[in-house]
Image (cartoon, helix red, strand yellow):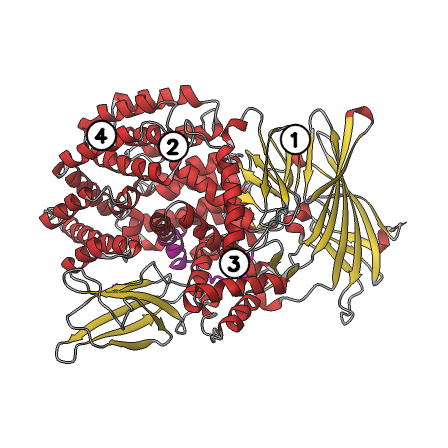
Amino acid sequence: MMDIDASPEKVVNKIRRQDYTAPTFLIETVNLHFHIVEEETVVTSILSVRRESFSSSTKDLVLNGEGLTLISVFINDTPLTQSQYNVTDHTLALFNVPDAFTLKTTVRIYPGKNTALSGLYKSAQHFCTQCEAEGFRRITYFLDRPDVLSLYTTTIVADRKRYPHLLSNGNLLRSELLADGYHAVTWVDPFKKPCYLFALVAGDFDLVNDTFETCSKRKVDLRLYVEKGLSDQTSHAMHALKAAMRWDEERYHREYDLDLYMIVAIGDFNMGAMENKGLNIFNTKYILAKPETATDDDYIHIASVIAHEYFHNWSGNRVTCRDWFQLSLKEGLTIFRDQSFTEDTISKAVMRIWDVKALREVQFPEDAGPTAHSVRPDSYIEINNFYTATIYNKGAEVLRMLRTIVGDQVYYDAMDQYFLCFDGQAVTIDDYIEVMQIASGKELTQFKRWYSEAGTPLVNIQGAYHEKTHCFRLTCTQSCPPTPDQPSKLPLHIPIRMSLFNQQGKKLFIKPGESECLIQLTDSQEVVEFNDIDTRPIPSLLRGFSAPIKLNYAYTDDELLLLSSCDDDPFSRYEALQQYLLRLLQAFIRSHQMKEPYVMNEQCLTFFSQLLTQHATDPFFVSELLQLPSEKYIGEQMHVIDVDAIHAVREVMLLTLSTKLNPLWEELYYKYDNEVKIFQFSANHIGKRQFKNACFSYLLCQAKYVDLAMKQFKHSFKKNMTDQLAALNALSHFDVPEREMVLQQFYDAWSQDALVMDKWFSIQAMAKRKNVVDDVQRLISHPLFDLKNPNKVYALIGAFGHRNITGFHNITGSGYELVCAVTLELDHFNPQIAARMVTPLLNWRRYDPIRQQLMQNQLELILQRNKLSKDLYELVSKSLQ
């Protein structure tokens, strides 16, 4: 890690997309030899290097390297003298090299001291790697950039008793026993790859085996490696992997290409998982699951992440990105693919809603804040800071729009062509769009602005119906607010799916035989007309959330409730109800701020009552309809976020719905509780459990239902973590003896299970208690909390800062102080995690003057640190500009 002067005046080197140049040298083959012992690892690399650009005036080869102790360096078997090379903290420069040669280097590294968890490091008793984005340079000297693709052969030598499993990319070539209790294993990857996809694992694991037969009848061995004693929690992950493999064959015509597919679950991992070719390394929380320890949400997320990393085998590995500015080429595309997978296998309606909620609560604020950037950024200081919701989630939405514009069949045909044309290459977003443009015959130049413009577009639509001519006219205006370095914006190509309904909720034909159309906005203002519409219609706009925009249309309350009842597009139905509830909450907030009374109207109560009677149609979907807009989403609709008013008003609305509809909540809770006593992971059972616990959460708005929560906790204890956690979460908000009792019982039962204890930390960090900051501070000192374990940091500090809006924004500023202190401590040894913890402070200008000042003080305190990582410096300095 480079330390830099934290003063704002310090000039920090930026990497700019426009400065990209192709590599002067290529590395055709890589032969790696690792000798692993407890305190150190010796790495020998033999590289076949070839000059690619003869037009370059430089005769020198400069390789990346960090934290390496150079032992020796040879060119064509001849040792170099010190005058022939130069070593710095970050590079190895070789002077006046030939046009083609073999480079052999030997270095010493210390994985046990690698607390950044980048490169080769030690997790518990296992050695593993994380090389994306720039971790390979911590292993050996190399051209650490994604456009240098090489063939790898890897030999690992280690103690065979301590490390019986020695794994790397590709297929196993040989294994042999050595003297003194050591053994050696050699792996060969037959496909060229960039160094960020290199992987190595050494350890003693439980191994779970299975097989998969591909569409061409090839047999693939599937291997899941987990910590000892945890193999009973892998069946869901294995099932999800096989489902993803089959889905990718059927939907994208992608067949797996090696004889072996391996996944290793590691307890210390900065990311969710990593798609290294043939050897995926996962955070344990995205592999391990059984009903006693994992919730429905866990099961769904495991399936999603398993699919994501598998899908990368083609969208990221076989075809990779030329440079890190093209990161969304692989991540946005693969997110889109895994979203489609969960829609097909779990619930098309609910998964789409979840994805949009995540986008609005994380990416939209990112787009509106000081670190706003485009899907294809123009510059960065630290690449790790661009693993963001914009690159991933907005990038996925851009591709979803593209599929909508060109049509499903053309999209899938173009994807086949894309993989065929660019297999084994490092390419750009422009290359991808060009394939889509040729396949569809559509001009997509304007569409590419989605990749270069930051910010969330706003589309205002006004409707006018002319009784005499039976013409319904929509006037559509698009705009986008200024973002850093982009004060003005050009119009985007925005696809808006829409339908029309009459006043009785019946769908109208827009054209003969067509009841849905696609509006494609390309100008700042456009008018769209629909003729032969016999009655004043109600438009259903942005169906399926067809574009990542904010859309305004002046619906009446009655129109929103009608669409909430009758719209046949699940997302549009959900969205109409959310907009109606948001409108109520905003009115209540204004009354609260004016210290005026506010009362729930009967119309809303009646609608919720009717909604509950429809539970049997799709309980999973109805459970989503029952959710009020989150505090975070409500705040994002305000110019100045009033944390206290939002929380107070939302709690009142929840309590009112709870008490007024009490008999219904009770009746339906008990009905579904009886139907899902025995845990099954299926769409049907998930839906019923989600609906039951939605009813349960409304009942637990009333303190009188503490006994019900105790009953559910007891009955689900060590049987059903979904229900157990719902009860624990409900009780965590009450200052009652039962709260401490169940927290202790939960701890006593699960203190040996790291992932379950992460839930225990999170529940307490997200509690709606006045002294929650004190609770979090106390838990930081808990024996099971480890600041060097990313999962623990996410579970406690991340849950508090990102998800406990009222606790974090306590008017005393104590929440800000806590997060700032932890962030600075983290920055000493894991800058990547530190940068993720600081993000709740960055949008400080959105709050009231008191909170603004308190947050600004903490950010300035961070910048006063003499030595600060690039990760943290970039984010904090941008927020204060």
Quarter of the figure with the C terminus: bottom left
Q: Position of residue 548 (x, y in %)?
A: 37, 61
On residue 670, the disc is 4
Determine which residue is flagged by label 2.
Answer: 680
Q: Residues within 10 Å of mark 1 (few under 14, many from 20)?
A: many
How many angstroms separate mark 4 from mark 1 (CA)?
Answer: 48 Å
Mark 3 or mark 4: whose residue is earlier in sequence:
3
How many angstroms separate mark 1 from mark 3 (CA)?
Answer: 33 Å
Q: Are marks 4 and 1 in contact (CB under 8 Å)?
A: no
Q: Which residues are magenta?
A: 358-381
Q: Residues within 10 Å of mark 3 (few under 14, many from 20)?
A: many
On residue 203, the disc is 1
Q: Does 230 appear in magenta?
A: no
Mark 4 or mark 1: whose residue is earlier in sequence:
1
Above or below, 200 relative to 666: below
How many angstroms separate mark 4 from mark 2 (CA)?
Answer: 18 Å
Mark 4: amino acid: Tyr
Mark 4 or mark 2: whose residue is earlier in sequence:
4
Q: Residues within 10 Å of mark 4 (few under 14, many from 20)?
A: few
User: 698 or 673, which is in the foreground?
Assistant: 673
